[in-house]
Image (cartoon, helix red, strand yellow):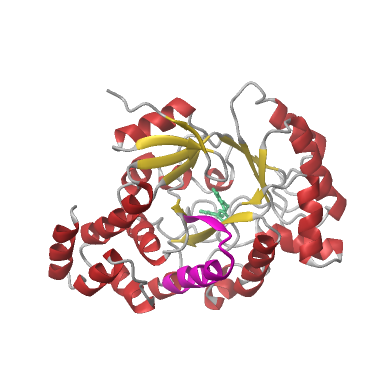
Amino acid sequence: MIPDLIVRRARQAGLADIAERALSGRRLDAEDGARLFAAEDLAVVAALADALRRRRHGDRAYFNVNMHLNYTNICRSRCRFCAFHRQPAEQGAYCLTPEQAADEVKKRLADPVTEVHMVGGVNPALPYGYYLDLLRAVKAARPGLHLKAFTMVEIDEIVRLAERPAAAVFADLKEAGLDSLPGGGAEVFAERVHRELFPRKIGAARWLELARTAHDAGLKTNCTMLYGHIETHEERVDHLLRLRALQDETGGFQAFVPLAFHPEHTGLSHLQAPTAHDDLRTIAVARLLLDNIPHVKAYWVMLGIPVAQMALSSGADDIDGTVTEERISHDAGATTPRSLSRAELVRLIADAGFQAVERDTLYRVVRVEEQPA
Ligand code: V47
């Protein structure tokens, strides 16, 4: 939609002031965020986000060729929204040795993978040395690979085990092969949600403190928000603005990844999953509020392919990667495939009307795809 048309439509929706500020590059605030979530006209919110997305990225949409490696599902946090965690003696519980993790990477040596996304539960049996050995083994299996590993929740555990300051631990992890960190474990920063859904795990202050320390150590990270369960719109806006405030200070977040809640087999299985309408609105509002985070990722695994495609016109500029062997959302009922081929990703981006660009984890261009005729 051309800007004049967006402003006219925004006027009809009672959002003219927000549209004018957003389109002139001025920052939106918490009240604007609440109005964008409450606005009936989703199309105008999405069009505004699309305008800002196109200013940054034109018609490019990014993807990467990656694999997921979940080294253990044993976890003492037992978050109510999670279907992935197991108790040590429970059926299906597992923990890979560093050698087994390396073998998983070696199985893919013939594929043009550029990134391993490696996360796991907070397994009380693992010592500090395990995490360093895990990084070293995976790195040695394929030295050119970018190792994006450990959420701030795992980092908190690793720092506790190391009995050393977080900055020193990040230095050790970097030396062992860590290249960057994914954005998980942030959930929703509101203390009410923390108490109800994940009381045994770190809350907002510690997550943000560790993200800050990672950025200070020169590590890029992503950031997430798990939405569509018990949180309010105000709590979503508060979460986004806390991420934005940290980004103002560090500039270390590369991408924001909204994670659509999957209720099956979780302690919240009575809840409905968020609708496509809510997915698109959340992505659009995130693009509009997070004026300092370069990328918004429509993670196809959790959104489903059709919504991920539509998200590219609602503020998102990235759909994540080939993924391979994702377990966290599939254990919670995700019906998306376990992986997509590079060609399938290119095709779904082109089909949505965008130029597919393969990137590496740090958003350096690997290859710009030919536009299909
Ligand atoms: O931290 C757990 C979430 C996260 C469920 O940084 C659930 O590039 C939905 O963070 N339904 C892990 N979500 C995934 C993650 C991620 C994924 C892809 C890319 C990146 C990135 C990060 O998944 C957890 C938690 O917030 N989660 N259970 C569930 N039932």
Depth check: 324 or 289 in front? Answer: 289
Q: Is residue 344 left or right of residue 129?
A: left
Position above or below: 212 against 120: below
- Classify residue 350 by image quadrant: top left
Residue 58 placement (x, y as % from top left): 33, 46
Residue 86 placement (x, y as % from top left): 69, 51
Residue 322 placement (x, y as % from top left): 52, 34
Q: Quadrant of the image for the C terminus?
A: top left
Position above or below: 269 against 327: below
Note whether residue 142 is visible.
yes
Position above or below: 167 against 181: below
Q: Is residue 41 left or right of residue 231?
A: left
Note whether residue 97 is visible.
no
Q: Is residue 10 left or right of residue 158?
A: left
Identify the residue shown where x is 60% and y is 31%.
113
Identify the residue shown where x is 14% and y is 63%.
9
Residue 198 placement (x, y as % from top left): 61, 67
Verify whether residue 161 appears in magenta.
no
Position above or below: 94 against 125: above
Total labels drawn: 0
- From the image, give the main secondary structure of the stretch colored magenta: helix
Q: Is residue 365 left or right of residue 160?
A: left
- Classify residue 95 by image quadrant: top right
Q: Which residues are magenta?
A: 237-258
Identify the residue shown where x is 57% and y is 34%.
324
Verify whether residue 248 appears in magenta.
yes
